[in-house]
Image (cartoon, grey):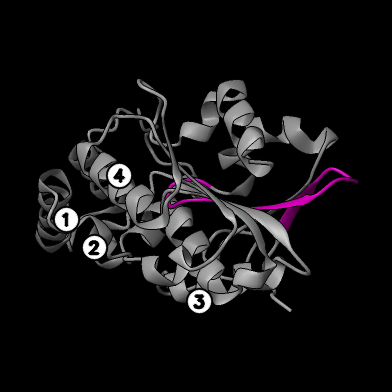
Amino acid sequence: MTDLAVERWGESGPPIVMVHGSLSSAATAFGEQQALADRFRIIAPYRRGYRPSPPTNRIDPDRDAADVAELLGDGAHLLGTSMGGVVAMRAAALAPDQVWSLTVVEPPALPNGSGRPAADRLAVALRDYWADTADSDPATFVAGFLRVLNVDLPLPSPLPPPLLEAARNLMTERPWETGVPVEALARTSFQKLVVTGGGTPGFEDVADALAEGLSARRVLFPGSPHAVQRIGQRFNDEFVASLSG
Protein backbone atom coordinates (compact mmCIF):
# COMPACT_ATOMS: atom_id res chain seq x y z
CA MET A 1 0.00 0.00 0.00
CA THR A 2 1.30 3.46 -0.89
CA ASP A 3 2.36 5.72 1.96
CA LEU A 4 1.22 8.91 0.23
CA ALA A 5 -1.00 11.43 1.98
CA VAL A 6 -4.33 11.65 0.20
CA GLU A 7 -7.25 14.07 0.03
CA ARG A 8 -10.62 12.33 -0.13
CA TRP A 9 -13.76 14.20 -1.14
CA GLY A 10 -17.18 12.59 -1.49
CA GLU A 11 -18.70 9.55 0.15
CA SER A 12 -20.45 7.79 -2.72
CA GLY A 13 -20.30 7.32 -6.44
CA PRO A 14 -17.57 6.13 -8.81
CA PRO A 15 -13.99 6.89 -7.70
CA ILE A 16 -11.74 9.36 -9.52
CA VAL A 17 -8.01 9.48 -8.82
CA MET A 18 -6.63 12.98 -9.52
CA VAL A 19 -2.89 13.56 -9.90
CA HIS A 20 -1.43 17.06 -9.45
CA GLY A 21 1.43 18.63 -11.36
CA SER A 22 4.72 20.27 -10.43
CA LEU A 23 3.90 23.68 -9.00
CA SER A 24 0.77 22.74 -7.12
CA SER A 25 -0.54 20.04 -4.80
CA ALA A 26 -3.65 17.94 -4.38
CA ALA A 27 -5.89 20.45 -2.61
CA THR A 28 -4.91 23.47 -4.68
CA ALA A 29 -4.75 21.76 -8.08
CA PHE A 30 -8.22 20.29 -7.80
CA GLY A 31 -10.08 22.80 -5.67
CA GLU A 32 -12.60 23.39 -8.44
CA GLN A 33 -13.21 19.65 -8.81
CA GLN A 34 -14.41 19.32 -5.22
CA ALA A 35 -17.79 20.37 -6.62
CA LEU A 36 -17.98 16.88 -8.14
CA ALA A 37 -17.92 15.23 -4.71
CA ASP A 38 -21.71 15.06 -4.66
CA ARG A 39 -21.53 12.48 -7.48
CA PHE A 40 -18.07 10.93 -7.21
CA ARG A 41 -15.52 9.80 -4.65
CA ILE A 42 -12.39 11.83 -5.35
CA ILE A 43 -8.96 10.55 -4.33
CA ALA A 44 -6.24 13.18 -4.75
CA PRO A 45 -2.77 12.12 -3.55
CA TYR A 46 0.12 14.40 -2.71
CA ARG A 47 2.97 13.12 -4.85
CA ARG A 48 6.27 12.29 -3.15
CA GLY A 49 8.12 15.45 -2.25
CA TYR A 50 4.91 17.37 -1.59
CA ARG A 51 3.97 17.57 2.08
CA PRO A 52 2.39 15.85 3.89
CA SER A 53 3.59 12.94 1.70
CA PRO A 54 7.12 11.62 2.27
CA PRO A 55 10.03 13.74 0.99
CA THR A 56 12.17 12.82 -1.96
CA ASN A 57 15.55 13.89 -3.32
CA ARG A 58 14.35 13.63 -6.92
CA ILE A 59 11.01 13.51 -8.70
CA ASP A 60 10.61 10.12 -10.38
CA PRO A 61 7.51 9.85 -12.63
CA ASP A 62 7.76 6.05 -12.70
CA ARG A 63 7.77 5.79 -8.92
CA ASP A 64 4.85 8.24 -8.83
CA ALA A 65 3.03 6.12 -11.40
CA ALA A 66 3.43 3.02 -9.24
CA ASP A 67 2.00 4.96 -6.28
CA VAL A 68 -0.98 6.09 -8.33
CA ALA A 69 -1.61 2.60 -9.70
CA GLU A 70 -1.99 1.36 -6.12
CA LEU A 71 -4.67 4.00 -5.48
CA LEU A 72 -6.81 2.75 -8.37
CA GLY A 73 -8.05 -0.14 -6.23
CA ASP A 74 -10.54 -2.30 -8.10
CA GLY A 75 -11.00 0.43 -10.68
CA ALA A 76 -11.31 4.20 -11.02
CA HIS A 77 -11.36 7.09 -13.43
CA LEU A 78 -7.99 8.80 -13.72
CA LEU A 79 -7.22 12.51 -14.19
CA GLY A 80 -3.75 14.06 -14.31
CA THR A 81 -2.65 17.64 -14.86
CA SER A 82 0.74 18.80 -16.17
CA MET A 83 3.44 16.40 -14.89
CA GLY A 84 0.60 14.61 -13.14
CA GLY A 85 -0.70 13.82 -16.62
CA VAL A 86 2.55 12.05 -17.47
CA VAL A 87 2.30 10.18 -14.16
CA ALA A 88 -1.34 9.27 -14.84
CA MET A 89 -0.56 7.90 -18.30
CA ARG A 90 2.31 5.81 -16.99
CA ALA A 91 0.08 4.55 -14.17
CA ALA A 92 -2.63 3.62 -16.67
CA ALA A 93 -0.10 1.59 -18.63
CA LEU A 94 0.93 -0.21 -15.42
CA ALA A 95 -2.65 -1.11 -14.45
CA PRO A 96 -4.87 -0.82 -17.55
CA ASP A 97 -7.53 -3.17 -16.20
CA GLN A 98 -8.09 -0.84 -13.24
CA VAL A 99 -8.60 2.32 -15.34
CA TRP A 100 -12.14 3.28 -16.37
CA SER A 101 -11.18 6.45 -18.21
CA LEU A 102 -8.09 8.63 -18.62
CA THR A 103 -8.05 12.44 -18.83
CA VAL A 104 -4.85 14.46 -19.10
CA VAL A 105 -4.38 18.23 -18.99
CA GLU A 106 -1.36 19.68 -20.84
CA PRO A 107 1.04 16.83 -19.99
CA PRO A 108 4.70 17.62 -20.79
CA ALA A 109 5.17 14.37 -22.68
CA LEU A 110 7.55 16.14 -25.04
CA PRO A 111 9.18 13.04 -26.56
CA ASN A 112 5.75 12.02 -27.84
CA GLY A 113 5.53 15.29 -29.76
CA SER A 114 8.92 14.76 -31.40
CA GLY A 115 8.93 15.92 -35.01
CA ARG A 116 6.33 18.61 -34.42
CA PRO A 117 7.99 22.03 -34.58
CA ALA A 118 6.61 23.69 -31.44
CA ALA A 119 7.14 20.57 -29.33
CA ASP A 120 10.72 20.25 -30.55
CA ARG A 121 11.44 23.92 -29.84
CA LEU A 122 10.02 23.61 -26.33
CA ALA A 123 12.02 20.46 -25.59
CA VAL A 124 15.25 22.21 -26.62
CA ALA A 125 14.35 25.38 -24.73
CA LEU A 126 13.66 23.46 -21.52
CA ARG A 127 16.77 21.32 -21.79
CA ASP A 128 18.88 24.42 -22.36
CA TYR A 129 17.16 26.29 -19.56
CA TRP A 130 17.94 23.53 -17.05
CA ALA A 131 21.56 23.46 -18.20
CA ASP A 132 21.93 27.24 -17.94
CA THR A 133 20.25 27.63 -14.53
CA ALA A 134 21.56 24.64 -12.60
CA ASP A 135 22.85 26.90 -9.84
CA SER A 136 19.85 29.24 -9.65
CA ASP A 137 17.87 29.77 -6.50
CA PRO A 138 14.37 28.21 -6.65
CA ALA A 139 12.48 31.50 -7.01
CA THR A 140 14.59 32.63 -9.95
CA PHE A 141 14.39 29.19 -11.53
CA VAL A 142 10.60 29.03 -11.37
CA ALA A 143 10.14 32.54 -12.75
CA GLY A 144 12.31 31.72 -15.74
CA PHE A 145 10.65 28.34 -16.23
CA LEU A 146 7.24 29.98 -16.47
CA ARG A 147 8.58 32.43 -19.06
CA VAL A 148 9.83 29.52 -21.18
CA LEU A 149 6.33 28.04 -21.08
CA ASN A 150 4.69 31.41 -21.80
CA VAL A 151 2.73 31.02 -18.57
CA ASP A 152 1.67 34.22 -16.81
CA LEU A 153 1.62 33.31 -13.13
CA PRO A 154 2.62 36.03 -10.66
CA LEU A 155 4.84 34.63 -7.92
CA PRO A 156 4.84 35.88 -4.33
CA SER A 157 8.15 37.03 -2.88
CA PRO A 158 9.48 35.32 -0.94
CA LEU A 159 8.01 32.02 -2.09
CA PRO A 160 5.79 30.52 0.63
CA PRO A 161 7.01 27.14 1.96
CA PRO A 162 4.71 24.94 -0.18
CA LEU A 163 5.72 26.74 -3.38
CA LEU A 164 9.38 26.72 -2.40
CA GLU A 165 9.15 22.97 -1.86
CA ALA A 166 7.45 22.56 -5.24
CA ALA A 167 10.12 24.70 -6.94
CA ARG A 168 12.90 22.55 -5.52
CA ASN A 169 11.07 19.45 -6.75
CA LEU A 170 10.67 20.97 -10.21
CA MET A 171 14.40 21.56 -10.46
CA THR A 172 14.95 17.78 -10.28
CA GLU A 173 12.57 17.03 -13.18
CA ARG A 174 13.56 16.52 -16.81
CA PRO A 175 10.40 17.37 -18.80
CA TRP A 176 12.11 16.99 -22.18
CA GLU A 177 12.58 13.30 -21.33
CA THR A 178 9.16 12.44 -19.85
CA GLY A 179 7.55 10.45 -22.63
CA VAL A 180 4.59 8.16 -22.14
CA PRO A 181 3.82 4.65 -23.53
CA VAL A 182 1.33 5.61 -26.23
CA GLU A 183 1.41 2.26 -28.02
CA ALA A 184 0.51 0.37 -24.85
CA LEU A 185 -2.24 2.83 -23.98
CA ALA A 186 -3.62 2.73 -27.52
CA ARG A 187 -4.37 -0.97 -27.05
CA THR A 188 -6.70 -0.25 -24.14
CA SER A 189 -10.43 0.27 -24.50
CA PHE A 190 -11.15 2.92 -21.85
CA GLN A 191 -12.16 6.45 -22.82
CA LYS A 192 -9.38 9.02 -23.24
CA LEU A 193 -9.54 12.82 -23.16
CA VAL A 194 -6.69 15.27 -23.84
CA VAL A 195 -7.24 18.88 -22.74
CA THR A 196 -5.25 22.08 -23.30
CA GLY A 197 -5.68 25.81 -22.81
CA GLY A 198 -3.78 27.11 -25.83
CA GLY A 199 -1.11 29.10 -24.00
CA THR A 200 1.98 27.00 -24.79
CA PRO A 201 2.36 25.94 -28.45
CA GLY A 202 4.66 23.05 -27.54
CA PHE A 203 2.01 21.54 -25.29
CA GLU A 204 -0.56 21.92 -28.07
CA ASP A 205 1.70 19.87 -30.37
CA VAL A 206 2.14 17.23 -27.68
CA ALA A 207 -1.60 17.06 -27.04
CA ASP A 208 -2.35 16.73 -30.76
CA ALA A 209 0.15 13.88 -31.04
CA LEU A 210 -1.26 12.11 -27.99
CA ALA A 211 -4.84 12.48 -29.18
CA GLU A 212 -3.92 11.00 -32.55
CA GLY A 213 -1.91 8.15 -31.07
CA LEU A 214 -4.55 7.30 -28.47
CA SER A 215 -7.65 7.95 -30.59
CA ALA A 216 -8.59 10.29 -27.76
CA ARG A 217 -11.09 13.10 -27.62
CA ARG A 218 -9.20 16.40 -27.94
CA VAL A 219 -10.58 19.54 -26.27
CA LEU A 220 -9.15 23.06 -26.28
CA PHE A 221 -10.35 25.74 -23.87
CA PRO A 222 -8.81 28.85 -25.46
CA GLY A 223 -7.40 31.41 -23.05
CA SER A 224 -7.35 29.00 -20.12
CA PRO A 225 -4.40 28.65 -17.75
CA HIS A 226 -1.93 25.79 -18.05
CA ALA A 227 -3.88 24.09 -15.24
CA VAL A 228 -7.05 24.09 -17.33
CA GLN A 229 -9.05 22.23 -14.68
CA ARG A 230 -8.98 25.39 -12.58
CA ILE A 231 -11.50 27.10 -14.87
CA GLY A 232 -14.10 25.08 -12.99
CA GLN A 233 -17.52 24.24 -14.37
CA ARG A 234 -16.71 24.34 -18.09
CA PHE A 235 -13.92 21.86 -17.56
CA ASN A 236 -15.96 19.79 -15.12
CA ASP A 237 -18.85 19.47 -17.57
CA GLU A 238 -16.56 18.25 -20.35
CA PHE A 239 -14.72 15.94 -17.99
CA VAL A 240 -17.85 14.35 -16.56
CA ALA A 241 -19.32 13.90 -20.03
CA SER A 242 -16.18 12.00 -21.05
CA LEU A 243 -16.56 9.55 -18.16
CA SER A 244 -19.68 8.06 -19.68
CA GLY A 245 -18.66 8.57 -23.29
Say which label, 1 or 3, has the lower sequence index: 3
Q: Is 70 contained in the magenta span?
A: no
How far across and down, in percent of the image, does residue 47 sit? 56, 62
Identity of the residue drawn at 69% across and 41% down: 244
Mark drawn on residue 111: 2
Mark 2 → mark 4, Cα distance in angstroms: 13 Å
Name the amino acid type tagged 3.
Arg
Q: Are marks 1 and 3 in contact (CB under 8 Å)?
A: no
Q: CA distance from mark 1 to mark 2?
A: 8 Å
- Picture coordinates of residue 10, whole percent (x, y): 84, 43
Q: Which corner quadrant holds the N terminus? A: bottom right
Residue 53, image quadrant: bottom right
Label for residue 208? 4
Dot 3 corresponds to which residue?
A: 63
Q: Disc 2 or disc 4, which is closer to the eye?
A: 4
Q: Nearer the viewer, mark 4 or mark 1?
A: 4
- Observer-nearest residue: 112 or 135? 112
Looking at the rendering, the stretch of residues picked out in magenta corresponds to: 6-24
Provide residue 21's location: percent of width, then percent of height. 47, 51
